């Protein structure tokens, strides 16, 4: 599993900059830059919160599925990086987040 730090503090799953969802999906199928990726699992606090199945605590390591086919760390849609950082300090939607660790092949 991958170590994840997340600055998207407006996300319902964010617990002290760790993810409490247990797994995430990084979008950006044709991405060439980090800014062209996003955390598709992002859900803004207060919106559809009842639909969010949080485990209740932030996890240091989680499963990351990845659609960013041009990323060095993508192996058959699974992230192989030892650690990533999802950025999105004041995000209101998924498209305002990104995988800061994205690196073009």
Image (cartoon, rainbow, N blue to C red):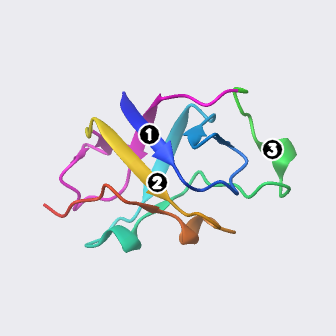
Residue span colored magenta: 57-79
- Residue 64 part of the magenta-drawn span: yes
| Residue under numbered circle 3 | 51
Residue at 73% over, 27% down: 56
Coordinates of residue 27 in the picture (x, y in percent): 44, 60
Q: Who is closer to the viewer here, 16 or 100? A: 16
* Snapshot quadrant of residue 88: bottom right
Q: Is residue 58 magenta?
A: yes
Whether pointer 1 and pointer 3 mark residues with C-beta atoms closer than 8 Å, the reply is: no
The answer to which of marks 1 and 3 sits earlier in the sequence is: 1
Is 89 placed left or right of 54 in the picture? left
Find residue 25 and name its label.
none
Instruction: Point out the tag, 2 or 1, that comes first from the N-terminus.
Output: 1
Q: Which residue is mark 2?
A: 86
Residue at (56% x, 31% y) in the render: 22
How far from the left and from the top, in percent, is residue 7? 55, 54
């Amino acid at each position: 599993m991958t170590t994840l730090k997340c600055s998207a503090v407006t996300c319902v799953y964010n617990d002290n900059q760790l993810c409490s969802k247990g797994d995430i999906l990084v979008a950006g199928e044709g991405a060439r830059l980090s800014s062209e990726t996003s955390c598709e699992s992002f859900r803004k606090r207060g919106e559809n919160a009842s639909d969010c199945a949080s485990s209740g605590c932030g996890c240091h390591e989680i499963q990351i599925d990845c659609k960013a086919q041009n990323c060095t760390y993508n192996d058959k849609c699974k992230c192989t990086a030892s650690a990533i950082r999802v950025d999105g300090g004041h995000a209101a939607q998924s498209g305002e987040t990104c995988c800061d660790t994205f690196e073009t092949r």
